[in-house]
Structures are given as C-alpha cells and as structure tokens.
Amino acid sequence: MEIRQLEIFQALAAELNFTRAAARVHCVQSNVTTQIRALETELGVPLFERLGKKVRLSDAGHRVLPYADQVLRLLREAQSIATESQEPSGKLSIASPESVVAYRLPQVLRRFQQKFPRVELSFLPLFSALVPQQIARGEVDFAFLIGDLIEQRNLVVEDIAPEPMALATSPRHPLAGRKSIRADNVRDETFLLTEHGCSYRVKFEKALAASGVIPHSVIDFDSVEAIKQCAALGMGIAVLPLITLEAELAKGSLVSLPWAGPDLTMATQVAWHKQKRISPTMTAFLSVVREEISTPRLANGRKPL
C-alpha cells in the first residue's frame, strides 16, 4: 500500500468522480483508475461501486476511509514538524463562509499578516454539512462557521462571537416601520435566503414552522451581496447575520424589521480536529482571532489552548 494510492482514494471518496479526483491530485484520469484498482486488489475488496457513470463508496470503502484520512493527516503533520521552526511559517488552510470571511476576519487577517508574514493563508469554500470531513481529511486546519452548538466527537469547537440574525428589506416595503414582526405577519412574503442547509436559514425556517408558517415564496442565493442588493430593490425580505447588514442599515438602503419571534441569535465558531497537533502557526492564528474578535469560550466545554 502506497501513500499515493491513499491520496487518490481520499480524493475519489471526496469527489465521487474520476475526472475531478484526477484534477484534485494532479494526475491523469487513467492513473486514478489504475491506482484504485491496485489498492482494491491489495485489500481484496472493492472500495467503490460503479453504477454506469455514477461512483459511490462501497461498504468496505466507508470502513477504510477514516483510516486513510488518519494516515494522511499524520503524514502531513510529520512533514510539518520536520520543517517547522518555532516562528510561525508555512501554509495555513482555512474553510469559511462568505459572511465570516468578509465581515469577521479582515481585521484578523490584516493583523496576522503583519505579525507573521512567513505564513501563507489559503481559503477554501465551506459547506456546513462537510465540515467534519474537511477537517478529518486534513484539507483544512481551521473551519469557521455560523451556527448553533456543533456536537462532533472528533472536533473542538469554540464560540468566538455571538451572531444575531436580522430580517431586512427595502424602506418602501409595506412592513417597514412596524414596531413588531411575527411569523404570521410574513406568511405571504417572499424571502431572499441562502442555499438549503445553511445554518441560519434552517434556524429561521424552524422559527416559522413553530408558528405553523411555511414560506410560499423563496428565492435562493449563494451570495450574501446578491441577497442584500435584491432586498434593497424591494424583491423580498432578507434573512442574514446582522453584521453583514450594518453598512446598508446605516445608510438607509435597507431597514431592519423588528422580529419578535423565537430568538435567532447564533454564533461564529472556529473548529479544528481534536487529535490534530496544534502547530506554532495554528496557535498564533488562534491567538489573533481571540484578541481581535472575542474572549474565547469553548462551545463544548473544553479549555482554550
């Protein structure tokens, strides 16, 4: 069994597509096929099921994947330790949604870059449902997200800032100026929301459902800025973290609707793998995050590093 085979296996397990897996590990598609077949022959079991053009992990593949993730993570840590100095340096990979990168992290990144110019920061898109896998596979050192408490046995999760949600719309909207807004008041409104599965969209939809309200008109976006622009044009009600709306609320292009329903406050959190060795670079980054954003409070009761 070779390290390269495990890397290709990990990539194919993540992509479930031979072409994308080949691009991910920088080789040709035929090499992915060859290495996976060699690994399956050595283990004596099929790791993937091929149904026409679809690929999915077999039962054996699901059992082997956590071990491949662990081996590769430990290898990367060993490589890092071998070349590491006490001064933060090297690459730091971070997964984060647009709302955190744009509105919580700029000051953190500016200060961190000033203090530790030898560190190369790399940002990856974050998909909330895939955070545990991204961290377990060693794809990222830290993942930022906005949500409620995450219960994952392999993750350390730290709340770094409260994030109240807000309903915002055009000043010309019929509901603008009301002193109180509840679920019944927005039953027939159009909502401008982030994609399905987004934590604060889920929380808002649950708040509506608790009052027996199911939105009949929803427009999905993958961009916070697009949601705000469309809300300002009167296309509907945006539901976003308050921090993303502050500039528009200050200049009056949007107004906040005084939500009187269930509390929509969540938290910006940072997560990392419980078994991962915390390098000087990671320690330095966490320190800057805490200094710039908040006093640390671990969501799962763990003490800060």
Image: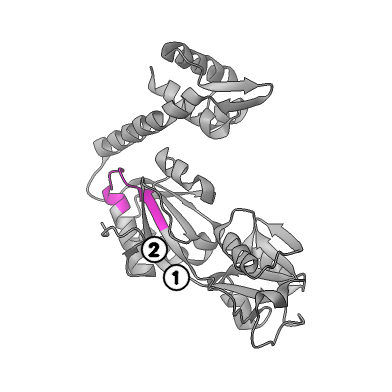
- Residue 159's mark? 2
Say above or below: 115 vs 55. Answer: below
Say above or below: 168 vs 2. Answer: below
Residue at the image point whose x is 69% and y is 21% from the top: 52
Residue at the image point whose x is 61% and y is 61% from the top: 201
Residue type indicated by callout 2: Asp
Q: Which residue is mark 1?
A: 162
Q: Is residue 277 magenta-colored? A: yes
**Rendering quarter of residue 162:** bottom left
Secondary structure found at label 2? strand
Mark pair 2, 1: CA separation: 8 Å
Q: Is residue 234 left or right of residue 156?
A: right
Where residue 297 appears, as percent x and y from the top left, is 33, 65
**Rendering quarter of residue 290:** bottom left
Residue type indicated by callout 1: Pro
Q: Point out the stretch of residues depicted in magenta.
A: 270-282
The reply to whether dot 2 and dot 1 touch (C-beta < 8 Å) is yes
Say above or below: 17 vs 259. Answer: above
- Residue 180's mark? none
Q: Is residue 190 left or right of residue 3?
A: right
Could one spot residue 255 in this view of the protein? yes
